[in-house]
Image: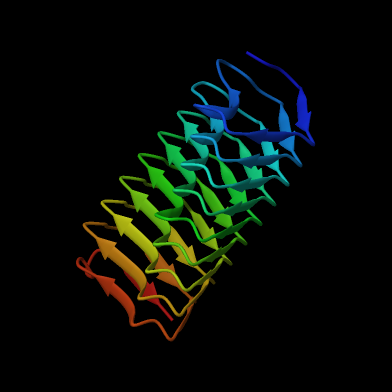
């Protein structure tokens, strides 16, 4: 593993697999101010790494912009993540922070969490993706908060995801604002829904809490 290194101000492009890879008990590293484009995966956070910072990078044109697998307590902040297949993907990841990023024009998802938990998704600008935020089998994310989610097909989509809190977000001009499928015990409150074709849908309204 790698400990307490900084990877900064590089151009990383046209790699067959990943542009930058952290693997095997790497912690305390910072990846910042890089331009990362046209790789299969822009930045990979592999298994068993924690407490790394990914900040201020321009990540574009990759199949996956940032891919985090079975990692914990990493911070992804202040990046420009555009025109990837998926912007940020978390699979089996725990306790990570995603905040202050500009995530736009990705083909599928701006943020995709699969089997992940205890995420904080705060203060991101998420626009013109197919899915702004998609949680699948992801539970206990207490902070999906103060994001600006606009012009996506689906603003926030939860599929079989439980015990999440969605509050004080601006959700506008999406085909679907917030959409819940097979998801229970979520709290959705004080969001600003504007000009979405379908403002909100919940197939299990008796098990979720909706407040104005």
In the rendered view, does 156 fall on the left or right side of 38? left
Residue 102: x and y, percent?
Answer: 62, 59
- Labels in figure, total: 0
Instruction: Please report the residue visible at 74 percent of the width from the left and 39 percent of the height from the top.
Output: 32
Q: Residue furthest front?
A: 14
Is residue 182 in sight in this rendering?
Answer: yes
Residue 42: x and y, percent?
Answer: 56, 36
The image quadrant where one finds the N terminus is: top right
* Residue 155 quadrant: bottom left
Instruction: Please report the residue visible at 54 percent of the width from the left and 35 percent of the height from the top.
Output: 39
Question: Compared to 81, does 116 lie above or below?
Answer: above
The image quadrant where one finds the C terminus is: bottom left
Instruction: Please report the residue visible at 63 percent of the width from the left and 55 percent of the height from the top.
Output: 101
Question: Compared to 113, does 106 lie above or below?
Answer: below
**Which sits in the foreground, 178 or 142?**
178
In the rendered view, does 52 fall on the left or right side of 4? left
Q: Residue furthest bottom?
A: 195
Instruction: Please report the residue visible at 30 percent of the width from the left and 45 percent of the height from the top.
Output: 137
């Amino acid at each position: 593993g790698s400990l307490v290194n900084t990877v900064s101000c590089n151009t990383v492009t046209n790699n067959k697999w990943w542009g930058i890879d952290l693997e095997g008990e790497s912690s305390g590293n910072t990846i910042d101010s890089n331009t990362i484009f046209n790789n299969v995966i822009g930045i990979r956070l592999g298994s068993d790494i924690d407490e790394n910072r990914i900040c201020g990078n321009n990540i574009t044109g990759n199949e996956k912009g940032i891919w985090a697998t079975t990692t914990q307590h990493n911070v992804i902040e202040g990046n420009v993540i555009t025109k990837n297949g998926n912007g940020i993907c978390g699979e089996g990841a725990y306790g990570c922070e995603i905040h202050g990023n500009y995530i736009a024009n990705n083909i599928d998802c701006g943020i995709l969490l699969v089997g992940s938990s205890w995420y904080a998704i705060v203060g991101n600008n998420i626009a013109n993706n197919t899915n702004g935020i998609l949680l699948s089998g992801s539970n206990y994310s207490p902070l999906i908060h103060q994001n600006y989610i606009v012009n996506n097909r689906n603003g926030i989509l939860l599929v079989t995801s439980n015990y999440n809190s969605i509050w004080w977000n601006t959700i506008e001009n999406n085909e679907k604002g917030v959409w819940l499928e097979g998801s229970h015990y979520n709290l959705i409150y004080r969001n600003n829904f504007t000009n979405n074709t379908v403002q909100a849908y919940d197939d299990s309204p008796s098990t979720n809490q909706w407040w104005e």
